[in-house]
Image (cartoon, rainbow, N blue to C red):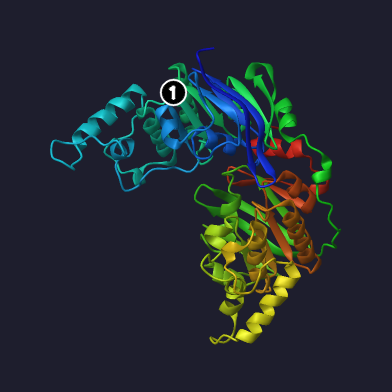
């Protein structure tokens, strides 16, 4: 191996009573592709945020190129040669390729305050030619493909003289050919002596380009293996091994006839000809990796996007949904994954957040404040929402109580189909169990539940059937009682 670029030892990060990282060890050498794997919540993102200076560890040391650090700031990380490419593209669409490469480090003309665009175009072309990249330096970023945008992020990182490149799920939004091209570029960068930390759920990629694999589980370091000396099954066992006591034990529910049906839904290249049904009282779980099309499918169902063909039926009646408002009025509601961005009205009270949908579908344009207060109080008691008053600002509640507030709002819609996208994301163990019990109660009341989850125990223990999404397709539907974590992960990553 080449020069030791990075040595992380004993790194710990604590949020409240939970250890996101617990005594983690990691090393990276020049010219190495070191893959970091683990389930959602294993601590991968926390570790790379520490290395990029976004957050500080509570314990441990970081050695970069022989310099010891207790923590890094983003400016220090960049100065030391660490560049991070996140899963979400961080480029400005309205600027050119060259402008994005030099953003924050523009080449100035002799006229004060004016950018020397011609020099930037020339330098950008020189950088990309060294990497055999053919993107037009004058093109607007908004006209680039997803693969070209990911490649441009790499060019931007290398322009800052990166010695360590961290890549977080770089192929999650790419097609097969685009993925191959990007992986070839990763190999070429490693051959030039750059140390690469590569994070991916797609284990076939890791075994193709990785030199070593480090496995994290529940915030703990499990081990590091040479890729040539380990197999997929061993990696999967190390990723998912856990005490079965964390599985929720739910009450059985009598399942009725088919109630909700989706036929041949497609959208661009992210959802491809998906069909399934959900019965009365059934929890239909949907699992898959980041970028598999799970959330996009939910958005098609409630009308955030429009399916390119296909249809839906509820109790035998064809639905005509063009917006989330239409969906709610026709009996379908979505509890979104990102509650702060799409689920909460942050400047408003608990009362307003809960009553919103009920007031929207009320037959009269006039508010009945007394009735509103009664309904909101009943939901607070039913869901045991811990709020000091109806008028308390929603952002002053805990994450679990915020989530229960969003659920309370949609319960007042009296919908028939409830779609939960990551229902317990960011909530504590106690709130998780309360949300689980609520899901089961809805099923007992004859509702149809669609639950999208990255939490494997949650998916297996709450679902009646589990649908597997991969690359936009619903590839498998299997009974949850017979599902095993290792089997599901193999379906998720395409390992048969």
Which residue is located at x 65 percent, y 29 percent? 24
Residue 233 lies left or right of residue 393; in this view the side is right
Q: Position of residue 229 (x, y in %)?
A: 68, 16
Q: Quadrant of residue 443?
A: bottom right
Q: Quadrant of residue 275?
A: bottom right
Residue 122 lies left or right of residue 415; in this view the side is left
Which residue is located at x 86 percent, y 58 percent? 252
Which residue is located at x 16 percent, y 36 percent? 109
Q: Residues within 10 Å of mark 1 (few under 14, many from 20)?
A: many
Residue 289 seen from this side = yes
* Extreme residue in the top direction: 1
Of the pair 110 and 457, the residue shown nearer to us = 110
Q: Quadrant of residue 316?
A: bottom right
Q: Does 302 appear above or below 460?
A: below
Of the pair 382 and 118, the residue shown nearer to us = 382
Residue 31 seen from this side = no
Q: Does 354 appear above or below 302?
A: below
Q: How many marks?
A: 1
Q: Does 274 appear above or below 198?
A: below
Identify residue for label 1.
163
Q: Position of residue 417 (x, y in %)?
A: 68, 66
Q: Does 162 appear above or below 257?
A: above
Q: Position of residue 72 (x, y in %)?
A: 49, 33
């Amino acid at each position: 191996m080449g020069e030791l670029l990075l040595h992380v030892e004993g790194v710990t990060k604590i949020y409240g009573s939970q250890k996101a990282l617990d005594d983690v060890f990691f090393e990276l050498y020049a010219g190495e592709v070191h893959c970091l794997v683990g389930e959602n919540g294993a601590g991968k993102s926390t570790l790379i945020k520490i290395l990029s200076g976004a957050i500080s560890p509570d314990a441990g040391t970081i050695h970069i190129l022989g310099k010891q650090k207790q923590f890094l700031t983003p400016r220090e990380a960049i100065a030391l040669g660490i560049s991070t490419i996140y899963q979400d593209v961080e480029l400005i669409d309205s600027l050119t390729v060259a402008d994005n490469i030099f953003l924050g480090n523009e080449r100035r003309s002799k006229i004060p305050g004016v950018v020397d665009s011609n020099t930037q175009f020339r330098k950008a072309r020189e950088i990309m030619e060294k990497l055999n990249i053919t993107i037009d330096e004058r093109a607007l970023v908004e006209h680039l493909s997803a693969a070209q945008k990911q490649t441009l992020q790499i060019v931007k990182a290398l322009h800052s003289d990166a010695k360590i490149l961290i890549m977080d799920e770089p192929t999650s939004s790419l097609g097969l050919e685009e993925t191959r091209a990007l992986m070839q570029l990763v190999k070429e960068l490693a051959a030039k002596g750059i140390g690469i930390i590569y994070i991916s759920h797609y284990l076939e990629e890791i075994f193709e380009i990785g030199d070593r694999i480090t496995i994290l589980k529940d915030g703990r370091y499990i081990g590091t293996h040479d890729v040539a000396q380990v197999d997929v099954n061993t990696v999967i066992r190390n990723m998912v091994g856990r005490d079965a006591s964390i599985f929720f034990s739910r009450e059985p529910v009598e399942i009725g006839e088919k109630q909700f049906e989706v036929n041949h839904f497609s959208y661009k290249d992210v959802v491809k000809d998906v069909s399934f049904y959900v019965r009365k009282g059934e929890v239909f779980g949907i699992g898959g990796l980041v970028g598999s099309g799970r959330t996009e499918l939910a958005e098609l169902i409630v009308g955030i996007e429009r399916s390119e063909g296909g249809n839906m039926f509820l109790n035998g009646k064809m639905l005509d949904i063009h917006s989330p408002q239409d969906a709610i009025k026709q009996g379908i509601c979505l509890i979104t994954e990102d509650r702060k961005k799409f689920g909460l009205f942050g400047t408003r009270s608990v009362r307003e957040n809960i009553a919103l949908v009920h007031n929207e579908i009320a037959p009269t344009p006039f508010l009945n404040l007394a009735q509103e207060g009664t309904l909101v109080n009943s939901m607070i008691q039913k869901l045991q929402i811990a709020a000091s008053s109806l008028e308390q600002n929603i952002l002053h509640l805990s994450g679990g109580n915020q989530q229960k507030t969003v659920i309370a709002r949609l319960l007042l819609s009296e919908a028939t189909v409830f779609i939960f996208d990551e229902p317990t994301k960011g909530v504590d163990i106690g709130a998780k169990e309360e949300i689980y019990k609520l899901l089961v109660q809805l099923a007992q009341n004859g509702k149809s539940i669609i639950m999208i989850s990255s939490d494997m125990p949650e998916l297996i223990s709450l679902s009646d059937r589990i649908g597997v999404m991969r690359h936009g397709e619903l590839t498998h539907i299997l009974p949850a009682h017979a599902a095993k974590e290792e089997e599901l992960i193999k379906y998720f990553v395409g390992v048969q």
